[in-house]
Image: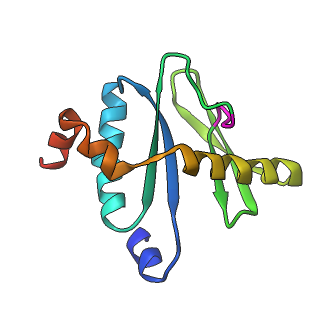
Amino acid sequence: MLAANHRAGKVQQRVHVVAEPPTPYMQYELTWQYGPNAAVGEEIGIILVAGDEWPDDLPRSDFWLFDSSVLYAMHYEPDGTWLGAEPVSDPDRIVAACRWRDAALYHAMPWREYIASRPDLKRYLAQ
């Protein structure tokens, strides 16, 4: 689907805030999951944070935003288990999500640049 969307000229972007050092699962996600997606055209950005640092203009929550108008809030258990997505129709929250998306894209480094700077992760891509 990602490759077909890319060939059709559609832009698919993702930004992930990553706490350093990444957990083993995050290492898996950053390599085994993101590598194939990036290879077929998904634009993936990484924002590195250390400790309690967090960009002031980004929420500490996850969301999906489609075409700047369709918003889903993601819900998780404290251990990270995904509980599901909640559709959001409040126009103020949708506009806020558009601002958060723009801020996240501004702060993010390209996934390929992040991986290139991390030989410990880059080696997983060759396997």
Magenta stretch: includes residue 59: yes
Expressed as whole percent of the image width and height from the top left, the position of residue 12 reads 51, 64
Expressed as whole percent of the image width and height from the top left, the position of residue 8 reads 48, 83
Seen from the viewer's position, the closer of residues 102 and 77 is: 102
Q: Determine the residue positioned at 66% across, 37% down.
A: 58
Magenta stretch: includes residue 101: no
Q: Quadrant of the N terminus?
A: bottom left
Q: Is residue 121 left or right of residue 53?
A: left
Q: Determine the residue positioned at 33% across, 43% down.
A: 114
Give the residue at the far top of this rendering. 51
Q: Is residue 24 left or right of residue 14?
A: left
Q: Is residue 61 left or right of residue 94?
A: left
Q: Which residues are magenta?
A: 57-61
Expressed as whole percent of the image width and height from the top left, the position of residue 72 reads 70, 50
Seen from the viewer's position, the closer of residues 12 and 104 is: 104
Q: Predominant secondary structure in magenta?
A: loop
Give the residue at the far right of this rendering. 91
Give the residue at the far bottom of this rendering. 8
Give the residue at the far left of this rendering. 127
